[in-house]
Amino acid sequence: MDQKILSLAAEKTADKLQEFLQTLREDDLTNLLQNQAVKGKVAGALLRAIFKGSPCYEEAGALRRRKIYTYCIQLVESGDLQKEIASEIIGLLMLEAHHFPGPLLVELANEFISAVREGSLVNGKSLELLPIILTALATKKENLAYGKGVLSGEECKKQLINILCSGRWDQQYVIQLTSMFKDVPLTAEEVEFVVEKALSMFSKMNLQEIPPLVYQLLVLSSKGSRKSVLEGIIAFFSALDKQHNEEQTGDELLDVVTVPSGELRHVEGTIILHIVFAIKLDYELGRELLKHLKAGQQGDSNNNLSPFSIALLLSVTRIQRFQDQVLDLLKTSVVKSFKDLQLLQGSKFLQNLVPHRSYVSTMILEVVKNSVHSWDHVTQGLVELGFILMDSYGPKKVLDGKTIETSPSLSRMPNQHACKLGANILLETFKIHEMIRQEILEQVLNRVVTRASSPISHFLDLLSNIVMYAPLVLQSCSSKVTEAFDYLSFLPLQTVQRLLKAVQPLLKVSMSMRDSLILVLRKAMFANQLDARKSAVAGFLLLLKNFKVLGSLSSSQCSQSLSFSQVHVDVHSHYNSVANETFCLEIMDSLRRCLSQQADVRLMLYEGFYDVLRRNSQLANSIMQTLLSQLKQFYEPKPDLLPPLKLEACILTQGDKISLQEPLDYLLCCIQHCLAWYKNTVIPLQQGEEEEEEEEAFYQALDDILESITNRMIKSELEDFELDKSADFSQSTSIGIKNNICAFLVMGVCEVLIEYNFSISNFSKNKFEDILSLFMCYKKLSDILNEKAGKAKTKMANKTNDSLLSMKFVSSLLTVLFRVLLWRYTSIPTSVEELGKKEKGKSISLLCLEGLQKIFSAVQQFYQPKIQQFLRALDVTDKEGEEREDADVSVTQRTAFQIRQFQRSLLNLLSSQEEDFNSKEALLLVTVLTSLSKLLEPSSPQFVQMLSWTSKICKENSREDALFCKSLMNLLFSLHVLYKSPVILLRDLSQDIHGHLGDIDQDVEVEKTNHFAIVNLRTAAPTICLLVLSQAEKVLEEVDWLITKLKGQVSQETVSEEASSQTTLPNQPVEKAIVMQLGTLLTFFHELVQTALPSGSCVDTLLKDLCKMYTTLTALVRYYLQVCQSSGGIPKNMEKLVKLSGSHLTPVCYSFISYVQNKSKSLNYTGEKKEKLATVATAMARVLRETKPIPNLIFAIEQYEKFLIHLSKRSKVNLMQHMKLSTSRDFKIKGNILDMVLREDGEDENEEGTASEHGEQNKEPAKKKRKK
């Protein structure tokens, strides 16, 4: 039969073939086809013959085709056929599909859809035919019966796709079905159907199946719905990441997906590569990605950004077109995130409203951690981002050349945080990715070398951390470091010191690097530039400190800077120590030559030798002999000669130029410290050893010299140094310059001897008398210099500020003094001290308090981690046996104990009469309380207690001292914002200010409130007025931030009603809080705007803040304009707020504007009418400055009213009924007034004999000017 069909098909006409096929039953044909297909014979040829004999223009032929199609599809799905045969059959079916009439195509498509929905497909091979059927259907122009209606071919296709996408898809055919649609011409709406369906299948699929599905979706996205594809992929993996982090225990991540962390990261990496590849082919996809992620910038950036989306963005940086945009987006997001954090940390009001979320910085560091799973495509982006953050937000140079740098623990500013994040990104990336290490190191070194004039401490810190992490690993990059050494001579000294300190661990493991450095330093030692020679000294001293000689004291006694295992791998430690000794002695020889160079170079040596001695004790003899031989050049050995030092030899005279040659005071200081160290550290370890007698004699000789210098310095008079009061100290003559240098040397020597004698005194009376004599010598010289400098009206040289006293000595001395004097402060109030005993200047108790305040602030700024130990040390009631119990006492409890002491002192002061009130002491006490209050935990009862105490002080005490009042109010506000919003406090204070200063309408008598006694006529303005306005500005900033956040959320919502109804409810508490804040602030401004404020900063600031108030109100109205589109209404409390603004704020704003303008005119026409031109110009400038914000305020009011009209229309609520018409503001020239003014000005020119009157008339305005 098959042969007959084939032979008939070979004829030119198909008539006989048609007739023959009509005689056959369906089963005969299908059986024949099955036999041929299963045997692998001529199934394709047979199928062609059947199609030839079954033309679609005949109904019978079309139906036969239709049945053959159905059977062939079943045959292919059965899996009984060979792969080639099945492909041939499907190919033929695809070729012939477009011949079908529309209704049969619909039937075929429905069969496929039913098979997909019922899950009856076996291998899915036949699905290749479905896109051809759908495409053919779309080309049919005639109307087709579909369901109960009639549709065109295109509409039928759309309906079928809709049904297919709304049904169930078997997990194994999801990829195939999605891939199928790329061959079907789709409208944007149809693409959206398919994309939504495919994205919804993510959670039902195995993780390994998602990358190919994502690939098919990205291919499909070229037809449209790019945004939906990207949003869906990012949302799914962001949620998966979040769940994975929460469930590290290995529980289910989603309903079906359970995967180890590594597998998830590999899948994410593959998907990121797919997306980046798709973006390279379709830039529109990249633009859509950036647009989607930038949308989060308007509201909360954390909503859109996640570790997955950040990793994707960093990979996109490899595409040149998007590199700058992506890095800029990430940089902005980082800083915005830190600014938000800063705002939240400073406001309890915001903390209660905004839930804590993970921040962009945490996400980026998570990306670095995840990149260990072969995410090589992310590393380059991470490195670029790290350097951009460090370059953009590193420490900045200020005017005097110093940099703004703070302790890392206290770097609360967003820019500092961003810079620190950049360094962390680079350090962590360096640790994980070996291939990128060389590039990071090279870029860091390039910045250190090329940016000598800019602050680069952050790069040096990063370099230090990199080297400390792996010195042995960095040996492979040693050439880069060696190259950097070549530039040492041209770098600033501070940079050289920090660079060498950073790479110092490398020098211990790389001999070649050490040799290269020594060559560079030896060259620099003889360079022309002074800085190069100083750098050489700094480098050599660092080497001496870190290459220990055999027999040096252990690190517990003199700690070395490096103590990790990588450096201690060398087994030849004994040999190294011996080699180190030779090496160090060579360096010492080089350094001795520096003692003949400039004073600055010698000074560096003297400052560095003591540190070398402590770290490398075996060099003690060599160092001390060097110092002794240097001292002998300037020491007068004869015991009777005065003075004991040859100051002339310390000064270099070259023609008219006189300069310091030998910093003798620093030389003595170095000797004194080295001696003290030797006595305290070496001698106790050498007891009983006879061979050290010679060494001890040598140190005894040094002791004797210092003792001799002390005795003779005490006997010497200033005349012996030719430095008495009659001497010339002017900076303009060579003798004056010489005398100044000598004076500073003598004062420095006195300081060194004071410390030396204190260290050996053992609290003996004689030694203390010597110390006092030395101090008197120092003081006499200091007084003479100050007196001469005062007469000459020139600044003293900077060296007057440098003290040679060590911190250890100062702290020991202060401890002794505190023990003696503490009872005076606690027992005797300042006012009781006898006036006769008071020195000129501050009293002792005030000095004690000032010292205490400086100590508190220094500890908080520089020693944050040690605050617990510091507070424990302060607690004098502690006993040694209670140490374990003390460990449980929190910082807050210890701080609260200290606070109580100072609270009592402040109360004692405030209980005194106004005339006995010591404002300086009160101010210091408040400063101390402010410092301590920062250590209290805001949620603790101690914090609440501190707040209520401060509030009570402000309510019950009235003092007219503006500085005290300002510091106390600042303390109150700083505490209050961490407890709750200060708006009610502001309202009460504004009522008090209004009551004291009176109303702008003189006929109105204001009822005086007395919420806070601290507000009085003297302090109300400008002190408290400016403070409350500043706080109001902060509240407005917070409210504005919340409104921006809400607007961002609304703009990200979908237009669908479901989405909007679900998202409006969580915003209600925030909206309510915003309205409450603005309502209370409105009453605050209502009071201040009616207050007769003095001209100057108060009026200026109030006008600016009113402008901000209206801008914030406008922002809220615009937010409700957005919300109204979905919800269709506005809350009642918003209506009340609008009504309040119309009745209580806008009218009085216009009255205040008139008041300010009238006041300006009165100043212009009365008090200053007869002034000289210069004074008039000054007054006019002030008037212009004060009235400048008025147009801005009027514009802000009008903008507010404009958007209210829009909101009224959209919400169908008449909000404008509460608003009165704005005041008419015309600018007509009034002729009669102009004539009068011109006449008066003409008269003034003729009046010349009334100078005294002018003076009197100007008194009032001048007084107002002072109030600013």
Image (spheres, grey):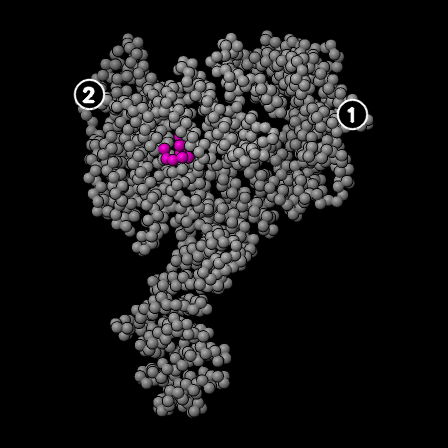
Task: Answer few, some or many: residues within 10 Å of disc 2's Cα (few below 14, many 20 plus, some between 14 and 19).
Answer: few
User: At which x and y percent is residue 1148?
Assistant: 24, 30
Left or right of 184? Residue 673 is right
Identify the residue at image location x=63%, y=42%. 468
Identify the mark nearer the N-term, 1 or 2: 1
Q: Amino acid at mark 1?
A: Glu
Residue in the picture at 30% in, 47% down = 1122
Residue for badge 2: 1235
Q: Residue 609 in the image: x percent, y percent? A: 69, 28
| 1028 left or right of 394 in image | left
Q: Is residue 1112 left or right of residue 715?
A: left
The crowding category of the residue bearing disc 1, from other C-alpha atoms within 10 Å (few below 14, some 14 to 19, many at least 20), is: few
Which residue occupies 37% across, 82% down?
67
Q: Is residue 232 magenta?
A: no
Question: Tag 2's secondary structure?
Answer: helix
Q: Quadrant of residue 21?
A: bottom left
Percent position (x, y) of residue 256?
Answer: 46, 62
Q: Taking 1235 as reference, is 917 left or right?
A: right
Residue extent of the magenta highlight: 972-982
- Residue ranking furthest to the left: 1232
| Residue indicated by mark 1 | 695
Residue 405 can be seen, yes or no: no
Residue 629 versus residue 691: which sits nearer the camera? 691
SS at mark 1? Answer: helix
